[in-house]
Amino acid sequence: MKVKTAEALVLVIVSITLLIYQIKQISFYRLREKQAYSTELKSSYYRTSVESKLELARIRHYFLYSDFNSSFKLYENTLELNPVYLQAWISLTDLLIDNRLDNEARKILFYLDRITGLSLKELWDISIAALRLNEVDLAVRNIALFCRGEPFYEWNRAYYILEKLDNGMELFIKYADDQSIVNYFKYTISADSYDHTLHLWNYINKSDMDISNELVLDYVDYLISHNNLDKAYSIWSGLYTVEGKERDNHIWNGGFESDIINKGFDWRVKNVSGVDVNIEDETQFSGKNSLKITFDGEENINYGNVSVVIPIKGGSNYVFEYAYRSSNITTGSGLYIELSCIDSSKSLVKTDMILGNNNWKKQKMIFNLNNDCSGILLALRRDSINKLDSKIKGAIWLDDFKLMESH
């Protein structure tokens, strides 16, 4: 009973507040009319009166839900003062739609669409009204114009609507400029709209649009996350070429001769407390560089933060080899390399554990890859342990990674 009483009291307070507001608005109109003695005052009155009348009409329409005739009359009064007041026309269109007068609303909508010089806000409002009337083509055409002029932080709400329409993407491509299409492509990646990303990429690629390498790499990563390694690698190969004998090696940048990109089919290094990873040129097995990983001895770490995705075909025998060096690895649980199937996480290869001090050595293994594996994840790993010497300390150097078909 107390709850109902409280709710009733709140409604009364809200109603009284809105009533007072309306009275103030009406009083304000009358006061302004009495003060309109000069040309300057008349101009000021004209602007203020029109805006205030529209505000009052909207309050009646959207908040008080008064009868249709009274709301319509207020919009009509506003438009008598300013027949080209677009916001009043748009609100009147909403009123007609709310009262299922769709044909009348369409007439106004098409009239507004013919008016040039619409602002971004009006483009957006007309788009929403068009969607309510199922005029999708008109809506998307205005959304395309909106996206062309609106700052980037407003794009998402437009692209969100496109994703909800059956043919929103196709219509948007028809009307939008190149940059807006690229921005929409970027949105579909972040929204995980897989089919739309494929379609948009094909369109962008075919149309030879200007697109940054960073966004292309984001798309390659996105395809990898969906296990579409074939398409991902075909795009990757368009950005990076492999020359000479390295063409037979399925591991990209296996000797760490190039800076790590941290995307695509290059190495991935994730920062983690107690571990420092960097390319260095002071010691190497071959070439100019190696990868050095240093552990500070403060963590009992479960490590797997250096990895690379390898696109590969199943049904063949492969030779895997790499070189390593270590210094003072002071724990009973050392480091090892694991190769696992990217589709199922099934382990394919685990190398011997690296412990203590070692000059440069090579490990080599031969294994068979089944047809049900579309790619491999190679990772440097270390398992945490429940022993006194659990905190790993020391350094390891890696170099000369190769994965090739066994003939």
Image (cartoon, rainbow, N blue to C red):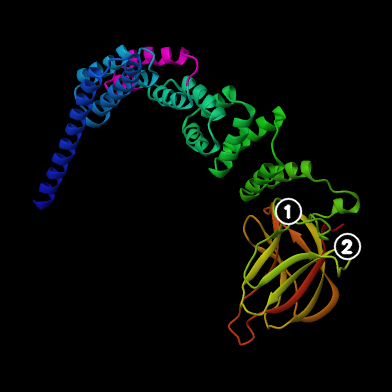
The region drawn magenta spans: 91-118
The answer to whether residue 254 is above or below residue 283 is above
Give the amino acid at mark 2.
Lys
Picture coordinates of residue 239, whole percent (x, y): 77, 43
Picture coordinates of residue 338, whole percent (x, y): 70, 67
Q: Residue at x 88, y 62 (%)?
A: 288
Which image quarter: residue 77?
top left
Picture coordinates of residue 385, whole percent (x, y): 60, 80
Given residues 306 and 39, the one toward you in this image is: 39
Q: CA distance from mark 2 to mark 1?
A: 18 Å
Q: Residues within 10 Å of mark 2 (few under 14, many from 20)?
A: some
Give the amino acid at mark 1.
Ile
Residue 141, labelled with which disc?
none
Picture coordinates of residue 114, whole percent (x, y): 47, 12
The residue identified by callout 2 is 288
Q: Residues within 10 Å of mark 1 (few under 14, many from 20)?
A: few
Of labels 2 and 1, earlier in sequence is 1
Given residues 362 and 389, the one toward you in this image is: 389
Given residues 83 and 308, the one toward you in this image is: 83
Q: Residue at x 66, y 42 (%)?
A: 215
Given residues 16 and 90, the one toward you in this image is: 16
The residue identified by callout 1 is 261
The answer to whether residue 270 is above or below residue 392 is above
SS at mark 2 in the image: loop
Is residue 99 inside the magenta stretch?
yes
Side (left or right) of 181 relative to 339? left
Name the image quarter holding the C terminus: bottom right
From this viewpoint, which residue is outermost toward the right? 244
Please identify the dominant SS of the magenta region.
helix
Q: Is residue 108 visible?
A: yes
